[in-house]
Image: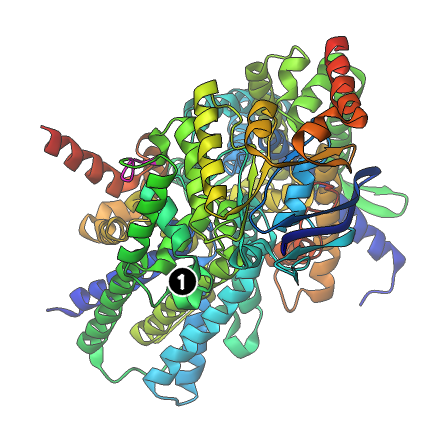
Amino acid sequence: MDPDPVYYVDLTLNGLIFGAMYALMAIGLTLVYGLLRILHIAHAAVYAFGAFITVIVANATGSIALGIVVAIVASALLGPAIYRLLYEPLLKHPPYVAMIASMGLLIFMEDGFRILFGEQGLTFTRNPYPTEIHQLFGVTINTVQIAMIVLSVVCLTALALFTTRTRVGVAWRATVSNPTIATSFGVDAIKVRYLNFMIGSALAALAGALIALLNNFVEPSMGFVVSYKALAIIVLGGLGSMRGTLIASLALGLVESFGTILVGSYLDRDALAFLFLIIVLMVRPQGLTGARA
Amino acid sequence: MSLYTYSLLSIVGINIMLAVSLNMITGFCGQFSLGHGAFYGAGAYAAALCAVAGYPVPVALIAGAVVAGILGFVVGFASVRLREDFLAVTTIGVSFLFVGFVRKQHWLGAEMGISKIPGSGLGAEGNAVMILLFAAATIAFSLYLNRSWLGFAFRAVGDDEQAARTVAIPASSYKLLAFALGTAIAGLAGGLYTYFTQFIVPDSFGFILSVTLMAMVVIGGTGSTWGVVAATIILTLLPEVFRFINDYRLLIFGGLLVLVTRFAPGGLAGIVNSLTRRLRRA
Amino acid sequence: MTNVLQVESVSIRFGGVQALTDVNFSVGKGEIVGLIGPNGAGKTTLLRIIAGVLAPDTGRVMLDGQNVTRLPTAARIAKGLAITHQIVRPFRSMTVLENTALAAGHKITANPLTAIFHWRRAAENSRAAAILAKVGLGGMEDRAVSALPLGHLKRLEVARALAVDPSVIILDEPLAGLNHREAEQQADTLAALNAEGLTTVLIEHNLREVMRVCKRLLVLDGGRIIADGAPAEVMADKAVREAYIGKADDHAAA
């Protein structure tokens, strides 16, 4: 194995970058689960949707930035629409019913993308960013990776400040961790639901767009594995806790980054996440940071 | 009958075994499992190894059932320790873990799988008959189970575990048994599949299959043996009869899942029940 | 008098809160005991420890002279304990008769490997029907539980508990949510069952009915037993009056 310390710095950086993307994805799931106790599997379809919109708009207008903005706005509308049309009527049933519906929607949308855009997916006609290489403190990093770090730090910090420093934010966070609190804070619980789907979907679209830029292409099934990793993350994070979700996301990113090198010959990368999940759950059934019994 | 018909019948029979056994875990006992394909795969690989090593058909089939059942029993412990939604995610993990593990194992043929598996010696027709007999036995067992005290107690555990404990039902043992029974049947189906195709690859047992099986259970009506059998037959044959459907198979499965959960959570069985009730009243 | 249920020096802490402190009491065969106390006194915690949902930090729970502190709930029920839930928990997919018959078959269902070889239900069905008649649910056998009013569901809880052939039954607020007349009927049923020899512990807020049917009262306050004796004496006790009136003042202030 490469003894160069930079190599390990590289692995760590890569792990954290992927962890940040997982966090952008998983925050939305946490928001939905905390409020409605639904495992919103179709969230990954929103992520793929965001990625496709980015590519399509960017190729049509020549502006990647515009593509990202349109993707975020469109996804922020799609998320609440899914809630309104699919989940709201199912709230009276046990939570697994909504989960199955959500799984159905994910399969439906992913296959829809395949039929609309083809098995091979789409590529950007002009995307110089992944190949713009920079040297930072001895590490090699490309422009998209820098954008991933900056944007996820900005978004997650903004979310953290909003939920800890503003009155509405505090009430909102309290509502997510305990929905019955909503009324005592004078918060409109229904509005909070829409807000959750909006913010969560916008973040997922951002993650989708950035991953699309990094890989320089989008494929119909791109959300599939990510969706289940995001589920694993929110379980690891103790379901419903934003802080736990963030920690679990970064931890998973690092475990994958190092694990692929260390045990990659026995297990593939996607299986690693679930091995990590299963081991953690067997030791701590309440998740990495959860305190609930 | 043509070879094609035999192969169709074999696939229908195997899918019935898989969906009906998943229904024992999820429908009867209320334990959500999205990893059923992994147990099917474990059974297929165990049987394939036995067959390649020269053991006779019954030994290979039993090995498939036992290996899958033991694996199911172990995964069942997750259902004892974890709450419902954690369990769903964990079983998804089992599904990915199985494929991810097998893909990297050279002694299991890695991504190329195991080929040149000796046949059962029964021919295509004999295989189809054997598979259909096992499928019929699975249905009969499922119907019996639902009438037995085991099924009665499963329902209680599925309804309310804590309440079940207060009528002296050791809920954890029941959940473990549900997993062991259901997954052993899936393993048996895996063994039959091995003799049917004589060639297995890890990707046949992945997550898509697990979801498809769950779709059959939900669309048929969770907990209803006949509903699940009907849904399995329809969903297996539809893409074969209407070739164009095959291209849109997942789109249709996904769409059906959404529509059924949204408008008829009882599935086919629920629809038939409410229709007959309406007819009787009329 | 032999003790059917014995709680010995039971204590438990949650985080920083001492929920129960050195709780000691025993219930003799054939007794009907009321366990009362203000909200938050620890009644539910105590019941959960007796039922085996929680393990105490120290102390023991004895059933018919056997230490059951380490046994899971189902095993305790099999040894003669029965409990009802404050918030009713019927098996929603079953009829009234099925709910009760399942409990009546507890010897079969105690082991899933026994249950798999049994299918006839006639004996359990007729026993269940007899129990349902006793608690005032005769004629309701084939109703789906989703269609039952709360008063009937509360009775179904009792029926299901009786069906496990208990030597002691602990009822968690069996009268809560019932109107005056329903509560009186339910309390009469419980008194009648006790008269037939069933050892009964009644956790209840409805003091009027508790005073009427119980021959002995235990008072729990702040996680301790503060009084134990005949109802009239207990209610005259200064500490008990303070526990209740203190609470009443809190309510007035709130």
The furthest residue to the bottom = B54
Q: Residues within 10 Å of mark 1 (few under 14, many from 20)?
A: many
Q: Is residue C110 left or right of residue B139?
A: right
Q: Main secondary structure of the magenta part?
A: loop
Q: Nearer the viewer, residue C107 or A37?
A: C107
User: Is residue A148 at least partly visible in the picture?
Assistant: yes
Residue at 36% from the left image edge and 56% from the top image edge: B151
Q: Residue A249's spot in the image, x, y percent?
A: 70, 43
Q: Is residue B102 above or below residue C167?
A: below
Residue at 25% from the left image edge and 43% from the top image edge: B269
Q: Nearer the viewer, residue A167 or A16?
A: A167
Residue at 46% from the left image edge and 32% from the top image edge: C188
Quick check: is C38 in the magenta stretch?
no
Q: Circle 1 sits in a helix, a strand or a loop, which is it?
A: helix
Q: Is residue B25 above or below residue B9?
A: above
Q: Is residue B132 left or right of residue B60?
A: left
Q: Nearer the viewer, residue B47 or B224?
A: B224
The structure's colour scheme is rainbow
Residue at 49% from the left image edge and 64% from the top image edge: B72
| Three-letter amino acid code of the residue under disc 1 | Ile
> In the rendered structure, the residue with mark 1 lies on which chain?
C
Q: Residue B235's spot in the image, x, y percent?
A: 26, 49
Q: Residue B203's spot in the image, x, y percent?
A: 45, 61
Q: Quadrant of residue A66?
A: top right
Q: Tell me the residue that label 1 is attached to.
A: C108
**Span highlighted in magenta in the image:** C140-144
Q: Quadrant of the N terminus of chain C?
A: bottom right
Q: Quadrant of the C terminus of chain C?
A: top right
Number of numbered tags placed on the structure image? 1
Q: Residue C251's spot in the image, x, y percent?
A: 72, 13
